[in-house]
Amino acid sequence: MDLVPWSRKGFFHVVWFLLLSLTCTLLIEVTHSAAHTDTRKVYIVYMGDKPKLDIPTTTTLPLHVNMLQNVVGSSNIEQEPHLLHSYKRSFNGFAAKLTEEEAQKMAGMAGVVSVFPSRKQKLHTTRSWNFIGFHENVKRSTVESDIIVGMIDSGVWPESASFSDAGFGPPPKKWKGTCQGSSNFTCNKKIIGARYYHNGRPFVKGDIKSPRDSNGHGTHTASTAAGNLVSKASLFGLGSGRARGGVPSARIAVYKVGWSDGISDDDILAAFDDAIADGVDILSLSLGKAEDDYFRDSISIGAFHALRKGILTSTAAGNDGPGPKTIANFAPWFLSVAATTIDREFVTKVQLGNQKIYEGIVTNTFDLKGKFYPLIYAGDAPNRTAGYDESTSKTCEPGTLDHNLVKGKIVLCDGTTGYGAYFAGAVGVILQSRPVADVLDPLPMPASCLGLDSGNSIYYYITSTRNPTATIFKSTEDIDTLSPYVPSFSSRGPNPVTPNILKPDIAAPGASILAAFPPIAPVSFVQGDDRVASYNFVSGTSMACPHATGVAAYVKSFHPNWSPAAIQSAIITTAKPLSPDLNPEAEFAYGAGQIDPVRAPYPGLVYDATELDYIEFLCAQGYSTKLLQSITGHKSSCSSKTNYGALSDNLNYPSFALSSSNPNCISGVFNRTATNVGSPRSAYKAKVIGATKGLEIKVNPSILSFSSLGQKLSFQVTVKGSIHHKSRVSASLVWDDGTFQVRSPIVVYAIYY
């Protein structure tokens, strides 16, 4: 999958993206046998709902083989195995090696919903939970130990203290999964299940053929969502405190899909197929890439079938910000989570030979002990033998620097990663050009990242001094008084496929998060970094997602029978508003705001939705009756008499987004239904907050009077007027009964934004 250019925002990304990018081509190309000259690729043939109960699932394999034989030919099937995996436990389909022509033929066969290439997806705490008000002594449900959190990621390091099963009883009786263990991996009563998926391609050297995590990503996210309480966790003394997940008593089921050559769609679907059938309660995926069709996207397909079984999926918004429409996961049937900062920052000082000191960022664990080293500007050390000049070497990309000129020195780089300096033998690196309000995770050498003004001062020092020197100090902790805000790496909306569904939904801590880490994985995710750590700081929406996963599991523990939509609504409507002054993209950066775990189980009202509601939504998106019947197995149809154009805005969603091609003539109507989950007898009054002049927002009726729990009442929101020449305006609807405040963001924006 395509990666964000490192020159602009690479240092914001979780650094393993750099490692994956070497092999993350969009498709897995498989050369056919010598008897054939065509090139086959891995395609996913999605066939919708799983076979009915009266048809044994064992018959799906012959069905899939027969379909392949009809397209490829029996003789070719015998010469080379084309079928890589059959999906049959939770939905129907298979992954197979096909040519483009064969894929087109397959797409025309009866019962096939879609055929698409298996692309590569990308992987998108001691303080973070306390920062959002979720302290260790919060009220807990006894059901929490029966909650199973499914992590579709890069595996787990089971020996971490975060996954000890001390004090845990046997797995919940509902659990139907397994532990795909080996001599180097065993499950326990905390990690109750683990599987790994690696279909249709050879293993790369260094990959561990088990659910064990050698990357670090999966261990980090799993411990953030549901890790145990672990005292004195830190990264070489930085961030010392008690590490814990959102639901420490919950169980974890691991589905490893992340490898050194990337993450394939066919593996993701295989993981969903098993996880749904295994009996998980919540699914967490800190990975993804935007697609323009809900049913040509593995995460969207898997999450839809999870929803049908009562399982909410939490996903990362992506790390491709801050541009508009960069969000990676945006289907309405799962939670899309943006990243925010917490109030802890790490300051890394640089001292020059003239004794001047500059403060920057980077979580730097190295200590040069005050020793000064020669200082050189990267633009003065190009690797000319490789064809590079000053204009390229100044950014310190790998291979651009002359080893003989930078070895043993500290290098000033115009770029934002400094990996080229590391590989060329530098002692340390000083980066510049960082935006305000961002973070930089550990690098494989002493490093600090400064603003442009400080960088210019250091450059002047280098050019005006005969023998410039510098040293870099180990980081110290400080308080970020502006937090929370959304860092630039977090992907932004609006929703690129369904403009009137607001995405992201919510924001959660995702900057410099300390969580469990495998001791065999490089702390900086760069090979050659030999530091060994059991806990590590990592940033990204990958870290925000498991915070939301943990909160969803927490809500589920109090309300086991709530639907995925109800849990999602509770999380969205109880969020804390964030400041657009710190986040210019406003709701397109943070959705409803900062997640509030303490309030989430007690929303007062929820905007619930059933599978039929989502089917009607999909009808409004132009999906056909035949296709939707294949997906769901239902006989329901898209009626020609229904105005589905209006329904595209009227999915019972807990937020409101209205796009318009004419900002001077805004008109929209939203129909919503609220379900009472607060006080049996209550009257909620509607308040519209923040409406801009010229834009009229009316709610009818303006009072909802409930007489019992579970009662549903409907209302309508009408938006009319103008936003003048603004690209976007924000407001909110709050239903207030004096005890509960149920807040939904309202965003009106010009469609050209």
Image: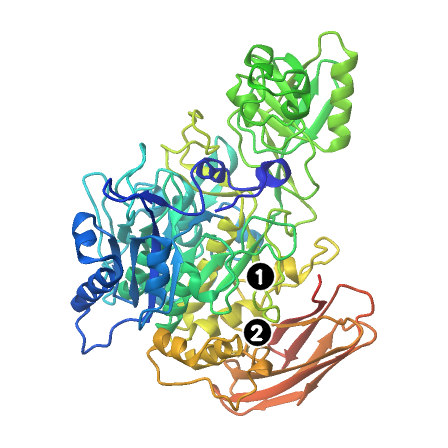
Residue 654 is labelled as 2
Residue 661 drawn at (x, y percent): 72, 70
Q: Nearer the viewer, residue 167 or 77?
A: 77
Residue 501 drawn at (x, y percent): 58, 70
Amino acid of disc 2: Pro
Task: Say which element carries label 2.
Answer: loop
The answer to whether residue 263 is left or right of residue 67 is: right
Identify the residue at horizontal 72%, vertical 77% (top origin): 688
Residue 430, compared with residue 622, is above or below; it is: above
**Residue labelled with disc 1:** 504
Q: Nearer the viewer, residue 94 or 220?
A: 94
The answer to whether residue 109 is left or right of residue 300 is: left
Q: Nearer the viewer, residue 435 or 636?
A: 636
Nearer to us of marks 2 and 1 is 1
Q: Is residue 554 visible?
A: no
Residue 365, compared with residue 46, is above or below; it is: above
Residue 550, compared with residue 700, is above or below; it is: above
